Image (cartoon, coloured by chain):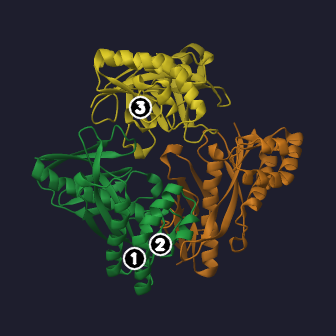
Chain colours: A yellow, B green, C orange
Amino acid sequence: MKIVAVDTGGALLTENYEPVGLVATAAVLVEKPYRTAALSVVRYADPFNYDMSGRQAVRDEAFLAVELARGVKPDVVHLDSTIGGIEVRKLDEPTIDALTITDRGKEVWKDLAKDLQPLAKKFWEETGIEIIAIGKSSVPVRIAEIYSGLYTANWAIDYARKNGTVMVGLPRYMKVEIRPDKIYGESLDSREGGLFGEIEANTDGIGWELYPNPLVRRYMVLEVWKT
Amino acid sequence: MKIVAVDTGGALLTENYEPVGLVATAAVLVEKPYRTAALSVVRYADPFNYDMSGRQAVRDEAFLAVELARGVKPDVVHLDSTIGGIEVRKLDEPTIDALTITDRGKEVWKDLAKDLQPLAKKFWEETGIEIIAIGKSSVPVRIAEIYSGLYTANWAIDYARKNGTVMVGLPRYMKVEIRPDKIYGESLDSREGGLFGEIEANTDGIGWELYPNPLVRRYMVLEVWKT
Amino acid sequence: MKIVAVDTGGALLTENYEPVGLVATAAVLVEKPYRTAALSVVRYADPFNYDMSGRQAVRDEAFLAVELARGVKPDVVHLDSTIGGIEVRKLDEPTIDALTITDRGKEVWKDLAKDLQPLAKKFWEETGIEIIAIGKSSVPVRIAEIYSGLYTANWAIDYARKNGTVMVGLPRYMKVEIRPDKIYGESLDSREGGLFGEIEANTDGIGWELYPNPLVRRYMVLEVWKT
């Protein structure tokens, strides 16, 4: 099975470990044995000017996933929205009302569906590929989350080169290591069966430290500085 | 403390990683230091013809546990039903109504209790051994779950010998390794403190691969084929 | 960031692994990189005479934390109460009523606040240091929990010296090792990123064994005896 998945993660942090905004949306192509990405693409956000409501993120994710999927032709596309694996092209009002989510969640999805339902319907008509809102249950979505952490580390390196130093928060229970010419990362949850990722990066002249975010258990902080 | 516990797990999967039916009910005898089974027995189900409502599983589990317990005389028997560690022989209607479970759960238990309450009462009168519905809190129940995964791997080997190839899903966050003359397995949740199991098996002429189920995070797939 | 945190944990167990009462309240000073304590203090409870409602524990914790904080002047004090990171000095009735906790929790906090709100207000007026009820989200609170486990092991050693043998239950998913002249402990949850602790202790002439509590998954039992 070939799956394209997408997720957004990684946050610029203040000195007090408070999030300023999210950094990276990553779309990945995942194939058997489903432990890492065969291919990944990123879209960086501007964390200083970020809509923390998350609605824009879901839209951006869907468009980035479709862009990658057009090229690689997967069997299915997984979005990071946990509404039961429903096909996004079928998300009309009665279907959303029948979901077992909160009333607030239904309002959000009725709004989101205005853009996403036509996108998914058009993509399905052209390619036969379904886009499903499977969320937390999907391993490829978790791999996309790990890649959003890798790209966040990459963003932090660029930022530190220009500004001297920076602190970012990684997605949940994952770590990264900045190695010569690449950034490696892996899940810290052993129950996930060994999920990991790697991207190429210019890592010359960079120092770094990784440690637990004291205010948010199970999340790690990455500090990066110019050496 | 000597504990007999029982659980059902492992599923035959389609090519799309969808469950067809469950494979193995395992009963285990667990003794201090409570990390593995001193003894185990299995009853295989027919996954092609499986009642996925789970009601039959609970009945089969109780009868298999009692069968093992008659031989090994434990201090207590643990069932995989999370209703607060209540003694099954006391499960009359008023007691079930007082449980803090859903109304649907109460209906299921009123039905189940018709068979299980007399079984537990008779077993207690004959042996003084209680059968308790302790469920997720019990380490021996988790060890039984790991053994149901080991026996599912064994079932898969037999099936692959006859049919060439097969895919099964293991119980939650556990892995198996098919070794010469045995199958080894362990929990992937480090918080459980090192739970594992092993059964003898004819593993000649068998190839295998283990990887995350892409559609169900924290569950592993085992593929087995004839070589 | 310098953080003082406090937690209570570790339980004396009966031969049937049932808790008799809690053993140790530990306050810790945690500094970057937030993986262990730079300093720790303990107050031992009398597990044979313990108020299991937990209300006394919260009071004792707050007073021990303030005592440590007076000396080390942290940036903030973390209590093990999960009510959203609110400042304890602001806990008046309307604020408690507005918390998203159960009605029962509100009654408990209205009672607790009688002692804790004046304590926190006075401490803040004198030092400018906030005491916040951040609970499960705080890494320093988890480190305090690990230290309560270390001190529980220390208490068990003393008890075994006098009484021959003892069984204690450690806080959730952690292990300890009794080494020459010290007790080492660490979290078993790999997602936490490597939290650990160590205290000095007289460990001569002591035997020990650590294994999963069969009745409470993810909790370990420590047996200690005189050799």
In the drawing, what numbered circle is on residue B88? 2
Which three-letter amino acid code belongs to the residue tagged 3?
A: Ile
Which three-letter amino acid code belongs to the residue tagged 2?
A: Val
Q: Residues within 10 Å of mark 2 (few under 14, many from 20)?
A: many
Q: Give the residue drawn at x 39%, y 68%.
A: B5
- Spatial CA distance of label 2 from label 3 is 39 Å
Residue B186, relative to residue C127: is it above or below? below
In the rendered structure, are the residues bearing label 2 and label 3 in contact, judged by CB atoms less than 8 Å apart?
A: no
Read off the chain for label 1.
B
Q: Where is residue B36 in the image (x, y as percent from the top left)?
A: 36, 65
**Quadrant location of the N terminus of chain A in the rendered image:** top left
Residue B158, relative to residue B127: is it above or below? above
Dots 1 and 2 on the same chain? yes
Q: Position of residue C89 (x, y in %)?
A: 83, 43
Q: Residues within 10 Å of mark 1 (few under 14, many from 20)?
A: some
Q: Name the residue under label 1.
A: B119
Q: Is mark 1 on a helix, strand or loop?
A: helix
Dots 3 and 1 on the same chain? no
Location of residue B49 (image quadrant): bottom left
Q: Mark 3 points at which residue?
A: A86
Q: Position of residue A48 (x, y in %)?
A: 62, 17
